[in-house]
Amino acid sequence: MYKSEYRYGSESLTLTAQPDGKGWKVTLPDGSEYSVLSAEAGENTLTLQTPTGRVQIAFAQTPQGVEIQYRGRVYRFQRADPLRRSGTQHSSAEGVLTAPMPGLVTKVFVQQGERVEAGQRLLTLEAMKTEQSLRAPFAGVVQRLNAREGELVQEGAILVEVVEEPDSLLRSE
C-alpha cells in the first residue's frame, strides 16, 4: 500500500493507493474510492485509465511538494511527511537497503532470518516501466524484511536490512 500525507492550506490530507487485482484502489481524503486500471506518467502529465474512461492530469513537482492542474484549476500540495528526515540517511554499505524511488515490489527472493551471499538478489522493484534488483551488499543474514510482493513503496522506505553474522566477522579478522 502507498500512503502519503499532504497539506492543502490548513488541512492535512491523506491519499492511499492499494493494489486490487485489476489495478489500484485509490482512496481520496474525503473517503471516496476510485479504481485505476493503469497509470502512465509523462514528464509533466499523469494519465489514468479508469473503468469509466481516461483522465489526464498535469502536474509539477516542486521542492515543497506537488502542483496539480485539473479542470482549469491549480492545486498546491505540500508534503506533510518528508521522505528524508535529517540525520536518518542509511547506506547499503551498512546493510540497510531503501527504495531508490517510489515503485512496486514485484518479487521478493528472501525471507527474514535467511543467510545471503554478497551480491545475491533480495528483491525486485518496478518503477516507471523499469525493474531494479536490490542486492545484498555483503554476506550476512536478513535481519529485517519490510517488503511484500505487490506492495507499493515510497522513495526512501527501508525494504531490507542485512547484518553480518558474528562468525563471518571473526573469519575476516
Image (cartoon, rainbow, N blue to C red):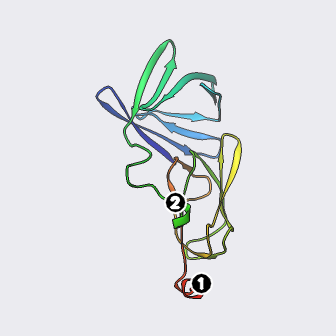
Give the quarter of the image for residue 12. top left
Q: Nearer the viewer, residue 159 or 57?
A: 159
Position of residue 146 measured from the top left corner of the image (x, y, whole percent):
52, 61
Give the quarter of the image for residue 115. bottom right
Q: From what the image shows, is residue 108 above or below residue 129? A: below
Name the residue located 60 percent from the left edge and 25 percent from the top edge. Answer: 44
Residue ranking furthest to the top: 72
Position of residue 16 measured from the top left corner of the image (x, y, whole percent):
47, 41
Ranked by sequence position, the earlier of labels 1 and 2 is 2
Name the residue located 66 percent from the left edge and 40 percent from the top edge. Answer: 128
| Residue 172 - label | 1
How many discs mark residues in the rendered view? Answer: 2
Q: Nearer the viewer, residue 95 or 54?
A: 95
Q: From what the image shows, is residue 85 above or below residue 144? A: above
Position of residue 136 measured from the top left corner of the image (x, y, whole percent):
63, 67
Of tags 1 and 2, the one toward the viewer is 1
Q: Which residue is mark 2?
A: 91
Q: From what the image shows, is residue 115 above or below residue 170? A: above
For the C terminus, which image quadrant?
A: bottom right
**In the structure shown, which secondary structural element does the residue marked by tag 2 occupy?**
loop
Q: Dot 2: few (<14), some (14–19), or many (≥20) neighbours within 10 Å?
A: few
- CA separation in Å, label 1 and label 2: 21 Å
Position of residue 49 measured from the top left corner of the image (x, y, whole percent):
65, 29
Name the residue located 49 percent from the left edge and 23 percent from the top edge. Answer: 68
**In the structure shown, which secondary structural element does the residue marked by tag 1 occupy?**
helix
The amino acid marked with disc number 2 is: Ser
The amino acid marked with disc number 1 is: Ser
Q: Nearer the viewer, residue 2 or 88?
A: 88
